[in-house]
Amino acid sequence: MVRTLVLKPSIKRAAIISSLLWSITLAFLMLLPQESFPESKLLSYDKLAHIFVFAVLSFLLGFALYREQNGRTIKTKLIPLTICLVYSSLLEYLQSFVPGRMFDWYDFLANFTGGLVGVIIFSIFIGKKFVIDKLML
């Protein structure tokens, strides 16, 4: 017998708000002119930062959009990944209109990789019985 999992409304609401705030923060940071960033060793890890921020986004989207049975259907994984892919494409395209910025295929690939990492982590996280029991009504 397959049981349907229902997230607590407060968890779902927090995930939706967090996803939106994270998306707005990403857009703000990714669309700043290049001159806005100070010289830093931290920025040399640019692709890792892209992977991290999009992993967080897809993880949050996983919770915000979670409605499937046991989290095992392909939709649970494809929808957050597709949203990350489209959002990443849009942000990379818009960067071509920002001084000092341009569309970068490697950034796009890092963003997609981050989205994939986030979906994998979400799938592992939601698959754990002790986590599911805490998140259910």
Image (cartoon, helix red, strand yellow):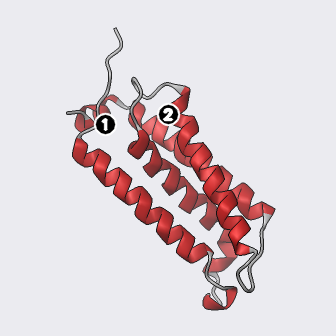
Asked if 98 appears above or below 80 in the picture, the reply is: below
Q: Is residue 41 left or right of residue 26?
A: right
Number of dots carrying numbers: 2
Q: Which residue is found at the position 34% from the left and 8% from the top?
A: 1
Pick the front one: 59 or 76: 76
The residue wearing badge 2 is: 76
Tell me if residue 38 can be seen: no
Q: Viewer-nearest of labels 1 and 2?
A: 2
Can you give x and y, in whole percent of width and height, for residue 119 in the image?
54, 42
Q: Is residue 97 left or right of residue 41?
A: right
Asked if 132 appears above or below 119 in the picture, the reply is: above
Q: Residue 51 is drawn in which quadrant?
A: bottom right
Q: Which residue is found at the position 56% from the left and 76% from the top?
A: 29
Measured in 3D between alpha carbons, the distance from the residue under mark 1 to the one under mark 2, in whole angstroms, is: 17 Å
Tell me if residue 34 can be seen: yes
The answer to which of marks 1 and 2 sits earlier in the sequence is 2
Callout 2: 10 Å neighbours few (<14), some, many (20+)?
many
Can you give x and y, in whole percent of width and height, for residue 109 in the image?
73, 55
Can you give x and y, in whole percent of width and height, for residue 107 in the image?
72, 64
Q: Which residue is found at the position 69% from the left and 77% from the top?
A: 44
For the C terminus, the image quarter is top left
Tell me the amino acid under the disc marked 1.
Val
What SS does tag 2 mark?
Answer: helix
Q: Which residue is found at the position 70% from the left and 81% from the top?
A: 98
The residue wearing badge 1 is: 131
What SS does tag 1 mark?
Answer: helix
Tell me the amino acid under the disc marked 2.
Thr
Q: Residue 126 is drawn in which quadrant?
A: top left
Q: Which residue is most to the left?
A: 137
